[in-house]
Amino acid sequence: MAVSVKVDHLVTRWAADHGSRLWMVVQPLSLVCIDLSCMALTAASAGQDIPRIACAAILVVAANGIGRVYLPRLLPSCLDRGFWLAGSGLVSTLVAFWGTASPLIVALCALVFTFLALCGRSVLYFATRKARRRGRTSPALVIGAGTHGHRLAASLLAYPEYGLLPLGFLDESADGSSGLPVLGRLSDVADVVQLHEVRAVVITGQAEQSLARTARALGCDVYLAPDLGELIVDFITLQEHVHGFPLLRMRPETERSVSWPLKRALDIAVAFAGLIVAAPILAICALIIRTEIGPGLLFRQRRVGYRGKPIELIKLRTMKPTDAHESATLWSIAHDSRVGPVGRLLRRASVDEIPQLWNVLRGDMSIVGPRPERPHFVEEFSRTIPGYGQRHRMPVGITGWAQIHGLRGDTSIEDRARFDNHYITGWTLRSDIKIMMRTLWSLLRLGGS
């Protein structure tokens, strides 16, 4: 009995500490299970066979995923995406039941699915609110102890169903009130988050971008809570709120995206296929390069990769070997007289980049990402170019958003950094596919350097 009580106590304590954080993972999975079950039940009731039942269930989940129905919310309502649910149900049943059911049956099945899905969500959300009122909330930290911060913290304390329990403030000078202390200065965010096991950070005052990114890197859900009088409220569609206070959720780090594993899978598929197709080209290039510059087909060079990790980049050699210092510090060889006609043609056609597909297979690089640079220039540009160091938040790539806009070779480093950071901030798998397609077109135009 004593062991059982102790285990129950530990489970309750863990749930109280991690409830809201766990909810952000469980909520989408629960909604997917609800939709799968409701569509399977609906299709089975309509007399469909197992393949069509499975098809309808998969289609409705895919459609709802495209419509972002499964994005986690602080306090969702079953009616939030009711019209989308009805539409996805109608399209899924129409496709899956094609040729086996009349339009009337399809419409009725869509209505039944929508009703069941909304009921399932109502039960799920009711249970969530009830659990939060019993203490299953996530420890939160409020940045900014001004009037707006205190009002928001008071609302979070009064309405625990939002799932955030404020522990205190971070502020440079203000005193705590409403029973909540000032736990430190803005620069103390890492220490306070770790000391108090904070799971969410709500920014209500002025804070640097680095503070939000630090909190996110520590595993916190980060929210921006603009005051109603701030201009940003009129420019952005607000999806979250705490008792009328608007909230903006910070995007998760790219590698925590649901589609992030698909990027690696796409890299492997493209690199493997590319090496097979390019094998005859590489064999011909090997013979030509040996004739022009002698032995030594491949050129290896140290570059800076993902999160500053050093990698060894592989290219086809297009000029006679140089000493190590010149290789590491010479900015461009585009107009170097040591590059022969064959080498210049290979560089213009970007054929010299083909061996980097092996870097992709090894996991050193991606097909799409910021181009890797040598350590000497990374150190120099990080000191002088705004945002240059932030490029390493994403795996380096063979091609990228900057390259397809002509920013390669001897072009503006500041422009490259801006394009690369824009790509990283808004990354999607669709953007990678778009960049690959535009890269193919640029190769046909011999746009290399």
Image (tube, rainbow, N blue to C red):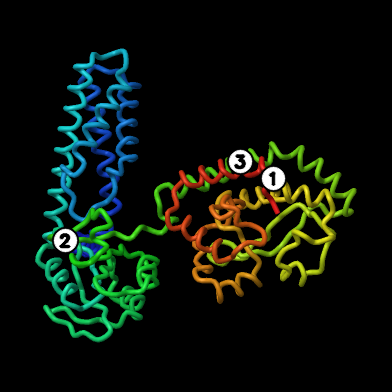
**Mark 1, residue position:** 446
Q: Marks 2/3: CA distance? A: 48 Å
Residue 76 shows in the view: yes
Query: What amino acid is found at the position of numbered circle 3 in the picture?
Result: Trp
**Mark 2, residue position:** 242
Residue drawn at x 56%, y 75% as measured from the top left? 384
Query: What amino acid is found at the position of numbered circle 1 in the picture?
Result: Leu
Query: What amino acid is found at the position of numbered circle 2 in the picture?
Result: Val
Q: Give the mark nearer the N terminus: 2 vs 3.
A: 2
Q: Quadrant of the N terminus?
A: bottom left
- Numbered circle sitting on residue 23: none
Q: Position of residue 412 (x, y in %)?
A: 60, 64
Q: Residues within 10 Å of mark 1 (few under 14, many from 20)?
A: some
Q: Residues within 10 Å of mark 2 (few under 14, many from 20)?
A: many
Q: Give the mark nearer the N terminus: 2 vs 1.
A: 2
Is residue 439 shown left or right of residue 117?
right
Residue drawn at x 23%, y 72% as measured from the top left? 142
Q: Give the mark nearer the N terminus: 3 vs 1.
A: 3
**Mark 3, residue position:** 441
Q: Quadrant of residue 62?
A: top left
Task: Look at the picture and state if 161 lies above or below 154.
Answer: above
Is residue 101 shown left or right of residue 161?
right
Q: How many numbered dots are placed on residues in this image?
A: 3
